[in-house]
Image (cartoon, coloured by chain):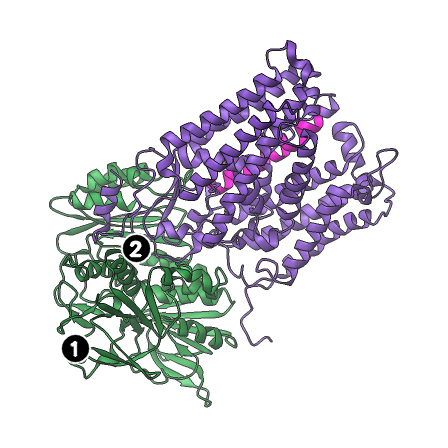
Chain colours: A purple, B green
Amino acid sequence: MAMTGDSPAALSGKQKLATGIGLTGLFILILAIANVNFPNKTLFLTLSLGLIAAGTIIFANDAYLGKHEGIKNDGVWFKSMTGRGFWAWILGIALTLFYIVLYWFPQYLGLNSDGENTGIIALFDPLSKLINGGPASQWFVYGTLYTLAILIFGYKFILKYRHNRYEVIRTFSVMFFQLGFAFLIPEILIRLNKPYYDFKNIWPLNYDLFAGYKIQEFLSAGNLGMFMLLFGVVSIFVITPILTYKYGKRWYCSWVCGCGGLAETAGDPYRHLSDKSLFAWKVERWVIHSVLVFVTVMTIAVVYSFLGDESKGYLLTKDVFLWGSALLLTIIFALIMIFKREELAKDAKIGAVSYFVIIMSIIGINYFSGNYKIFFFDAYLLRQWYGFLIGAAFSGVIGVGFYPIFGSRVWCRFGCPMAAILGMQQRLFSKFRITTNGGQCISCGNCSVYCEMGIDVRAYAQKGQNIVRSSCVGCGICSAVCPRGVLKLENGSRNDRIRSEEPVMDDNVDLMDLIRESSK
Amino acid sequence: MEHIVIIGNGIAGITAARHIRKRSDNRITVISGESDYFFSRTALMYVYMGHMKWDHLKPYEDWFWEKNRIELKKAWVENISFDEKELHFAEGGSMSYDKLILATGSVYNKFGWEGEDLDGVQGLVSKQDLELLEQNTKSTKRAVIVGGGLIGVELAEMLRTRNIEVTFLVREKAFWHNVLPLPEGEMISDHIKAHGIDLRHNVELDKILSDGNGRVMAVTSSEGEEIECQFVGLCTGVRPNIEFLSGTPLETDKGILVNEYLGTNIPDVYAIGDCVQHRQISGGRKAVEQVWYTGRIMGETLAQTLTGKPMKYTPGNWFNSAKFFDIEYQTYGWVWPEPTNNEAHFHWRHDKEPKAITIAYDKASGEFLGINTFGIRMRHEVIDTWLNEKKSIEFVLKNLKLANFDPEFYDHHEKEIFGSFKNNLQEA
């Protein structure tokens, strides 16, 4: 008989069994990576994915069903897996190694472009043939596992937050978009011999959308191709601003996006690991906007070089494109500086001005010197470096590989250029905010701890300020974990969205008086 | 430039310090023996339950204090020479002040029970209590908690996360019935039991028994039952932490007596927060009111006074909130556990989920007096306006949706609540 109360970290018998089942499924995949050639691949693939799903579902059922609905964070910081302990490091290293092999050494996974696949990629051939008609690639394997993860951990998340309908609906949404838009539709398009296209993967997150080979693909795919190309342009320039104005960037980042989908489901157990310090916020602002500048420059260069000299006969010549882009950037820059400069912090102004000047002068120097390398380097080199540094190393290896150490939204917070654009829109032109409920905050800090984006929510809540931050993805967890009902995600009037710098509790004693004053 | 010294780095003392700094250039020193930095006392439970780590309880990063020129001193004040305006520390040394703010908080009650000083018997107020709890519950299989209030139910929840069996002795016939109306108290009692707590109403603590080695072995209840346990949680309220002030010219009763400006009987000495007893207080409030929010408001009020803008303590409409396991509770205005003479209660409860509302109103005029909500969040600003504008209960129920603060997509119950009110009226 144990003499102590069990630590909250202990697993129940059923959870141990479920872990065993899930690991068995995973073990089949590992055997496949080790090049075990399974006789009946369909059977073993089904078995493997089925066991992983079953294990996760049984585990989740035991962990949440039959228990009271409510917040389930007991022991989060005590458990090795979620408290940056031994198992967290093991998982982090394993994921990181997987990403390195996936991106740069797919042959070790069994990819063989000249003949039959082997290894784990061969294991996925039957499923690939079933859906898109061809043999699997490393990306098909990855896409399948990614989708599976969002589905099964989405299920777990839904059980965990089943008392909170916002979380439930939102999770169904990310599961739907992953399964349909990110996985099935593009694979079926391949089967139909159409360009591979994930309609919800918007430029600049989808940095290759306007790469030369992609545009070529679209142009040679008839009406559907034209539609895809147009949809890609409309997505970023029309749909995105409208939806973000109405609902904040959450419509994308925590309802639609695949990166966000994985972070919200498989990454949920690690959301509390994000860094909340002011220093981290400063780093975030510089890094994410630098990535945005990088992707903008890279894309301009790629399209510019794609248009080439042959475009002379068309409406869109390379000169028109270049100066059109410069004009667009100038207009955006000017509008923000004219109408929104009050809302920009000092470093934001410095950043915006210096990046603007740099981009414009580079374009000017190179254009007038007759240099076809509009940003000093060949466009394909820029794209290659972006793909390597940002597309693979940042979003994959660091973004997901380091979930158990730095939290689930490292990429979304520090790296994603799409999040940067949506963030600017959200901060400056949106109806979305997290409203703080009068004086009910007790500064407990649950909101800040469980904010996956590292926002120090409490800093605002305890002052009675609404939270209007570019990085907020609207996951709603701060509101869910608040024990006093202080936070509410809302799309409301823009008039009272941001309360004054010296809010609620300051210079006033009857706090409600001041709330009224400052919201006028 | 004056030297303002604040004893106590809790919410009251720190709020005062921050606001004095905003409004003046005075030298500010905050003294605490409890912790190096300000932390959220209300969140102690989350550290024990593993939701947070200690550092997360700090609402400000450590660099904040130096940047804002708020000096921190870690020491226990042993006694104060009010005449010389000097503090003497238990660790040795002294410090002089121009103005002194006492924000010493509270300590948990002990009522002279036999065995109340045994090992394994404690309350939960301070950082040291939390550390002791961690020690005390290492070898605990069964615990007894005494006192059905907010800290009691929190402690019960905490211990359950470590799979400790909890027997919960509550004097009232329903949980927190000295504050909550009976139907609500009963709903919370049911919820507590559903979480595996052995909740006993109408039972008090009689004696705490020793195992012979100075450690608790069992308690006996007012019903004469002996309950085996290795831990006893004393959660029968708190009282002002003023023992170290006894024998000084400072006037105290239950707490440090203060006037409307939060001044004590000694010039340049003020008191705020849990340790205070108001000489006069209106609005149905208690003279000793140990709540996070009032501590904060007192801190702000005093900061105004000390920076050249004398201000009376007028805390506005009462509000409070808590969470009982999974049920959130909010209250605005006054809802007394037993309706007072002119007061009537309208009570609604969801038929399946643990959601409920009680609205207190004036029988004669129908004026809205206060609201308790369980499992439904309310918008502070809206309710506060309604209270100030003395809206009728009819108005409140008709417009209840405007006050809803639940997350998006939650079920709304306003129609059902309004219908239930109409039915009640017809029946009455």
Dot 2: few (<14), some (14–19), or many (≥20) neighbours within 10 Å? some
Secondary element under disc 2, as helix, strand or loop, is helix
- Of B400 and B91, which appears nearest the observer? B91
Mark nearer the viewer, 1 or 2? 1
Location of residue A43 with respect to A430 vertically, above or below? below
x, y percentage for residue B56?
45, 60
Question: Measured from the top left, where is residue A329 in percent x and y?
Answer: 50, 27
Chain letter of disc 2?
B
Residue with the mark numbered 2: B183
Magenta stretch containing residue B202, yes or no? Answer: no
Can the viewer see residue B148 in this picture? no
- Left or right: where A23 falls relative to A520: right
Classify the position of the C terminus of chain B by image quarter: top left
Sequence-wise, the earlier of marks 1 and 2 is 2
Where residue B189 sits: x, y (%)? 37, 60
State whether residue A50 appears in this view.
yes
Three-letter amino acid code at the position of disc 2: Pro
Residue at 48%, 48% in the rendered image: A282
Range of residues picked out in magenta: A166-189
